[in-house]
Image (cartoon, rainbow, N blue to C red):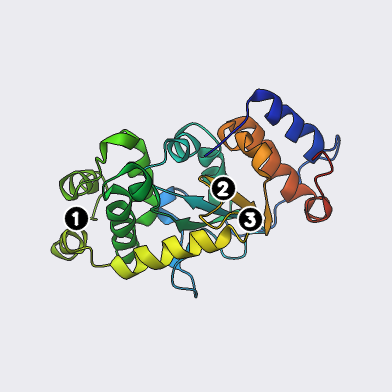
Amino acid sequence: MVRGGRWVVLCAAAVLMVAGCGQRAAEHEPDFASAEELPERLGADGVTITVGDPEAPVKVHLYEDPRCPYCEQFETTGGGPQLREAMLDRWARAEYTLASFLDDRVGGTGSKKAVNALRAALEEGKFVEYHEVLYDNQPEESVDGYTDAHLLRLADQVEGLRSPEFDAAVRSMKYRAFVTASEKAYEKAGGAEEPEGPGTPTAVINDKRIPLKYNALLLESDTFAELLQNIYDRPGEWEDWEDTTA
């Protein structure tokens, strides 16, 4: 879960950014016209879902649980829309590790069902659109509202997603093995210090994790956009940066 407040965001901005330098000139193919055009695929590890131009220089790896209200905040009003714009402009790409730990902590099966449905949407080339729809219509965390019926109703909002194959995959939990493997990958990402996983949302940008105490910047749209832009403009400074404020 995200901790901290506005002072954390300001502290993070002061520590991570330096003044000056304009935007780096982009050298890439024409931008994607819409989110529907973004490439999406399953990574070689069988659990990471990757979205965007594979050659984009800024890679944002996100750890999310579909029931997590902070993930919903990130995806709808926080840094998520800014990340999508950067992906459309081809200078950022996203990777998703989908957790389902909230089912065990809060009760129910909604996270697992949603992760299974997202994997089914990926099979149809509709992960990006369905991922957005799920967060735009996220039930209350305590309600366990991601039922089969609700997930299928939401799929109606994504043109071309509903089919006998997709519906059967949702109802039968076809990708149960993926759900389990993805949760294990999430837990492994926490390492020895966080054996239950790093919390959601967590962002690792170009293989460097945003420290937990700065995680609030994920929910600040403009600050997250500034962070991404600075990493794009000055990647070496991000790679070399060490948090000395602990």
Which badge, 3 or 2, is on the more N-terminal residue?
Answer: 3
Secondary structure under badge 3? loop
Residue 244: name its quadrant. Answer: top right
Give the amino acid type for the residue marked by disc 1 in the picture. Arg
Q: Residue at x 26, y 47 (%)?
A: 108
Give the amino acid type for the residue marked by disc 2 in the picture. Thr
Residue under label 2: 202
When the figure is inspected, residue 238 is found, relative to residue 12, above or below; the finding is below
Give the amino acid type for the residue marked by disc 3 in the picture. Glu
Which badge, 3 or 1, is on the more N-terminal residue?
Answer: 1
- Report, in whole angstroms, how far the alpha carbon at label 3 lies from the one at label 1: 42 Å
- Decide if residue 233 is on the left or right side of residue 96: right
Q: Closer to the observer: label 2 or label 1?
A: 2
Residue under label 3: 193
- Report, in whole angstroms, how far the alpha carbon at label 2 lies from the one at label 1: 31 Å
Residue under label 1: 162
